[in-house]
Image (tube, rainbow, N blue to C red):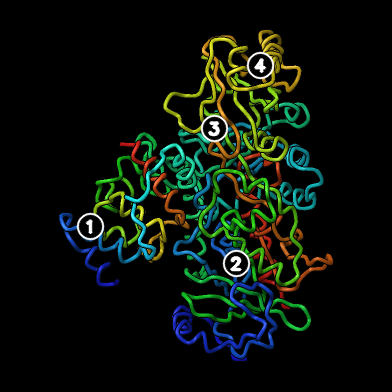
Amino acid sequence: MSEKTIDRRTLLASLATSAAGIALSQHSSAGTRVAADSQEIKKWDIVTDVLVAGSGAAGISAAIDARRGGADVLVVEKLNKLGGSSALSGGVIYAGGGTKLQKALGFSDSVESMYHYIAHSGRKHPHLDKIQRYCEQSVAHFDWLVDNGVPYNKRFSNGKGLGFDEASLYYSGSEEAWPWRDECKPAPRGHVPWEKGHQGGKRLMRSLLASAKKLGVKTQKRVCGERLVVESDGRVTGMLVDIKGERAAIKAKRGIVLACGGFIHNREMVKLYAPELYDCSVPWANAGDLGIGIQMGMGAGAAALRMDQGFAIGPIYPPENTIAGIAVNQMGQRLTSEEGYHAVMGNIVTYKQDGIAYFICDKDSDRPQGDDNQPLVAEANTIKELEQKAGFPIGSLQMSVNYYNEHAKNGVDPMFHKSKKYLSPIVKPPFKVYDLSVDKTMYSSHTFGGLQTNVNSQVINVWGEVINGLYAAGRNTSGLPTSPYIASGISVGDCTFFGRQAGQHAATNKG
Amino acid sequence: MKTILYWMFFTTKTAALSVTVALMLAFNTRAESLSEFTGDAEKGRLVFAQCRTCHYPEKIIGHHNGPNLHAIFGKVAGKQVGFDDYSETFKAAQFVWTEELLFAWLANVEAMFPETTMMSLGVTDPQQRADLIAYLKRFR
């Protein structure tokens, strides 16, 4: 095997000759992700210390810290634009425990409160070791973002959801909703680089990409990973890639970081692994979220966890007046507190109600005019008539609304403890039913399942052992986000933080 | 095919329509035509929804990761004021967006404009493309 140092010219030159360098085994077929035996590689077309597949928040954070750790780093990206789905996201980072921004705006927070909220508000039995490291190092991680040029405004918003104001700090989850407001002291932890029109993700990635470039991280677009290359002792040492239709072999002397995102755009894979998400109307990610990194890892024996879980939302707010309405199932029964983070309701609808739900409101809690997101099912001047028109079981909706109104007029919600400021009886006609079902309203979804990794972002195989030389981060892994998704910023926060762990560990890995 | 592309980028607006037709024939190998389909705007609402990661058709929201799509048909591609993130392909483009051109483009995004930075897999189903276009036409 020949080795050479990579530079841009080498990389480009290698594109022309790459196909000749590989002798694929007879078992190989187009589309397979089964790892290749290193014996099959006659010549490495490109050699680097650390190879990162994917240029979203996880990949670029890995690249930055690997480069800072002294490694030569090459990032390859399948698409013609760097930034991944992170660049299309809100760019929120869930951070706390007393970050500089929290302190500057007068909020106190603790690692313990943050840990309690993340550990207990999502799905059962989460990755507690990851949550602990994430929370303990959150203050330093926020400093890292700032040091890498991510801009934050010293401004707080008390609105629910990302606003159109210039705030960089807000309550991005259900911290103020019952029962969390009683169990762990609420603090605003959504840290978002401000960019006009919800473009925090674009701003975040522009900063991280600029920082990576300044540090000397090499990037190459239009390069798509196909298969990992494994040595006889199990170490992963390379990747076979497709460069504009030509195949090439890239050797990574210290490690490979899979940061290729989730798989919501691979519809067959979604149907197989995450059937509930398959029914959600809107795949919410950029075109690269095809599960290629997960498949490459599985092809090398990696375990894949929580593959059915994901983000699924059909928000009823903003505007906030709608929160006074109620969400019910097809039996007319109320589902949850409507003030909770919208993915919490999304989880209930998607996974526990067969994807079917409705929003009930009166004149004051009605949806804004001209908003075509949720289809109107029925409209009437009494709840009884509304129930009949919409086809709820006789008496069911009347019972739910009467019970809700009876207590809402006294400012309480015995069933779900919605905050007093959002409680208002549903009494002013016209009354309306909107469809909140996952296949009728705009229901955005993406996946949370992925490869198993440890706190150093090393990939774990199906027997529970570390796969030497292989790392993964972001939605390529099963990380902090679970169903229900508990706050904006958990996903991109997880991407950046565990991307960094991957980069740091890979840089020091001597095989 | 490359000749047609080249011509398109440097042609004048007045010639754009005929170029559009040529492009449709060149790229739409299944020779589907928008005229064969009746778009359903209500169904198009959800087909378009995935585009909302980057594009809004509501004028008031403005540009996002991609340019705003309010009254997009009839506009010259790649020239909207306030959007500074066009790919070189669209900066240089001088054609006018028509329903037919969008119908052809979304069939195979990278085949028509290989250097686009639009991060979309397109919409392979022609009926869904027609629905999407019917929906976008609401915003004008």
Q: CA distance from mark 4 to mark 1?
A: 56 Å
Q: Amino acid at mark 1?
A: Gln
Q: Position of residue A344 (x, y in %)?
A: 67, 35
- Chain ID, mark 1: B
Helix or strand or loop: what does disc 3 sit on?
A: strand
Q: CA distance from mark 1 to mark 2?
A: 44 Å
Q: Amino acid at mark 4?
A: Lys
Numbered label attached to residue A68: 2
Q: Closer to us: mark 3 or mark 1?
A: 1
In this rendering, the answer to whether B83 lies above or below A365 is: below
Depth check: A143 or A475 in front? A475
**Crowd band around label 4 with a 10 angstrom C-alpha radius: few (<14), some (14–19), many (20+):** some
Q: Position of residue A363 (x, y in %)?
A: 51, 14
Q: Closer to us: mark 2 or mark 3?
A: 3
Lower sequence index among marks 2 and 3: 2
Disc 3 marks which residue? A156
Q: Amino acid at mark 2?
A: Arg
Q: Which residue is found at the position 58% from the left and 16% from the top? A: A386
Badges 2 and 3, same chain: yes
- Residue A103 seen anywhere in this rendered image of the structure: no
In this rendering, the answer to whether A450 lies above or below A98 is: below
- Chain ID, mark 3: A
Q: CA distance from mark 3 to mark 1?
A: 43 Å
- Chain ID, mark 4: A
Lower sequence index among marks 2 and 4: 2
Disc 4 marks which residue? A420
Q: Which residue is found at the position 58% from the left and 42% from the top? A: A191
Q: CA distance from mark 3 to mark 4?
A: 22 Å
Badges 2 and 4, same chain: yes
Q: Closer to us: mark 3 or mark 4?
A: 4
Depth check: B27 or A319 in front? B27
